[in-house]
Image (cartoon, helix red, strand yellow):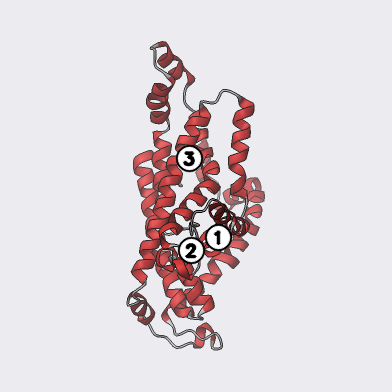
Amino acid sequence: MTTMQASNQTPRWERLRSYLSRSGSLYLMLIPAIIFLAIFHYYPMYGVVIAFQKFNPGLGFDKSPWVGWYNFEYLFAIPDLWDILRNTLVIAISKIVLLQVAALVLALALNEVRSIFFKRAIQITIYLPHFLSWVVLGGILIDMLGSRGLMSSIFRSFGFDPIMFLGSNETFVPTLVITNLWKEVGWSTIIFLAALTGIDPTLHEAAAIDGASRWQRILNVNIPGIASTIILITCLNLGGILNAGFEQILTLYSPAVYQTGDILDTYVYRAGLISAQYSLAGAIGLLKSVMGLILVVTAYWLADKFSGYRIY
């Protein structure tokens, strides 16, 4: 009798008990995480019903009047909706494209640095901004780029008109993209640097013997060697294309730049918490969640198709 036949003849409850005796402690470690997810992620999902109600906090979810699709019809009739959606896409895509290109270039440059001390010093310097919250950085940037900030004072001292980095629709979006790049580019290089370490050194040795310059080795060895990683990161970034950076924009924007700086998340914040239009905010949030789900599924499908990455 083979081992598999003996296993099939063992009662199911005994196989389950044997499995739990070996792996039960691992499942026990999962219990706190499952409780956390259930309380803070799944239980609040019941609140999406306010998107189909005329929600009254005094009446609660159960007694608030049901209005069906009215909130969504009202949402799509708002003239500013398409401008807000456009702003969200423009800011998010600009951040994703510029950040990925800059992170790739920086990773390739750092990979060519031969001095370990200098390389580590540069890495630590560019990593640090990632660990600061936008609340802290927002205050610093307002002091530096505001109408009465450091940069304006410098311009005035040289006789130039100050640039309204945070108060002009022409400069606000570039300011968002560049400051986000400064904060996150160091952290984004980690994946590319890790991918570069996986390239076979003999390929570089063979290329050097054939007379390839350092620049040629970068173009013909390094970039093709991490092409699958580049494709993977590009595909996965698609899932976050509706997340244009709520914390950053909330700390830096003002009514003067709503035309180009207002995004879905900030509009939900103002409609839901400030104007107390809870049902409208719920409808916008639900719409964004559905669109985000579609984008995430599409991103993982593309990642599987082009780079072989699968989460299960």
Indicate the secondary structure of the residue bearing disc 2.
loop
**Residue where numbered disc 3 is placed:** 103
Badge 1 or badge 3: first in the primary sequence = 3
Q: Position of residue 103 (x, y in %)?
A: 48, 40
Q: Residue furthest top?
A: 209
**Residue where numbered disc 2 is placed:** 167
Residue at 42% across / 59% down in the picture? 242
- Check disc 3 and give the amino acid type: Ala
The span from disc 3 to disc 2 (Cα, nearest Å) is: 29 Å
Mark 3 vs mark 2: in front? 2
Mark 2 touches mark 1? (CB < 8 Å):
yes
- Check disc 1 and give the amino acid type: Gly
Q: Is residue 19 visible?
A: no
The span from disc 1 to disc 3 (Cα, nearest Å) is: 28 Å
The span from disc 2 to disc 1 (Cα, nearest Å) is: 8 Å
Indicate the secondary structure of the residue bearing disc 3.
helix
Residue at 41% across / 66% down in the picture? 288
Q: Residue furthest front?
A: 159
Q: Position of residue 213 (x, y in %)?
A: 41, 18
Q: Position of residue 126 (x, y in %)?
A: 58, 41
Badge 2 or badge 1: first in the primary sequence = 1
* Disc 1 packing (10 Å; few <14; some 14–19; many ≥20): many
- Rendered image: mark on residue 146: 1
Mark 3 touches mark 2? (CB < 8 Å):
no
